[in-house]
Image (cartoon, rainbow, N blue to C red):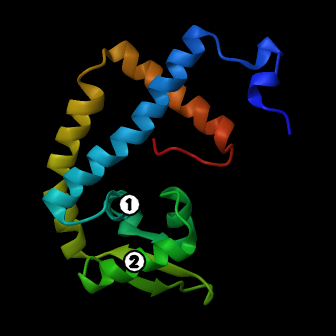
Amino acid sequence: HRDVSEIHDESIWLDDEERRAWFALVSVMMRLPHALDAQVRRDANLTHFEFSVLTVLSNSPDHKMKMSTLAATVDGSLSRLSQVVTRLEKRNWVCRLPDEHDGRTTHTQLTPEGLAMVEAAAPGHVALVRQLVIDPLTREQLTQLADIGERIMAATDPSHHLPG
C-alpha cells in the first residue's frame, strides 16, 4: 500500500471551496443528530430514532406501515427496528399487526396513545429544527439545501425516496 503522501495526482484532492463544503457537511452530520437526540430524550424520553419511527407512522395512511418499508424509510435494519418496536409496544405506543393478505408480513401501527405522544413531543422538536436549520437560512438557501440533500441522497442511495 502506498502512503497518502505519496499520491501525486492533484486531481483527486479537494480544492479550498470543496474542502470547506465537505468539512461543513461533516460538522453538521456529527453535531445535528446529537442536538436532535438530546432534545427528544429530554422532552419525550425517546431516542431520535424512536421518535423518527413514531413520526413516520403518524404521517402514514391509517398510521400503519409494513415493517420492511418502515425500516427502509427510517434507514434502520429490520432487526434494529424490531427491537425499537418491542420497546415502543411496551409503552403502548405501537402495535404489530399481521398482514391480511400475506402471513409472512407484519405491519406496525401507531396506537392512539402513540399518536398523542408524538403530537405532544412534536412542537419542541419542530422548534429546535427551526432554531438550528430553518431560521438561520433564507428561503433561497432552504430551497438550495433541499436540492442539495436530494442530490446527495440520489448519489448515495438511488432507491431511497425522501418524504415529500
Residue 33 is situated, as x and y percent measured from the top left of the image, at 36, 46
The single residue placed furthest to the top in the displayed view is 16
Residue at screen point 61% across, 90% down:
103
| Depth check, front residue: 21 or 48 | 21
Real-space Cα separation, disc 2 to disc 1, in angstroms = 11 Å
Above-or-below relation of 64 to 154: below
N-terminal of the pair, mark 2 or mark 1, is 1
Above-or-below relation of 109 to 122: below
**Circle 2 is placed at which residue position?**
85
Residue at screen point 23% across, 81% down:
91
| Depth check, front residue: 110 or 23 | 23
Task: Report the number of discs.
Answer: 2
Q: Is residue 26 left or right of residue 93?
A: right
Q: Is residue 21 left or right of residue 123?
A: right
The single residue placed furthest to the right in the displayed view is 1
Residue 4 is situated, as x and y percent measured from the top left of the image, at 75, 28
**Circle 1 is placed at which residue position?**
49
Q: Residues within 10 Å of mark 1 (few under 14, many from 20)?
A: some
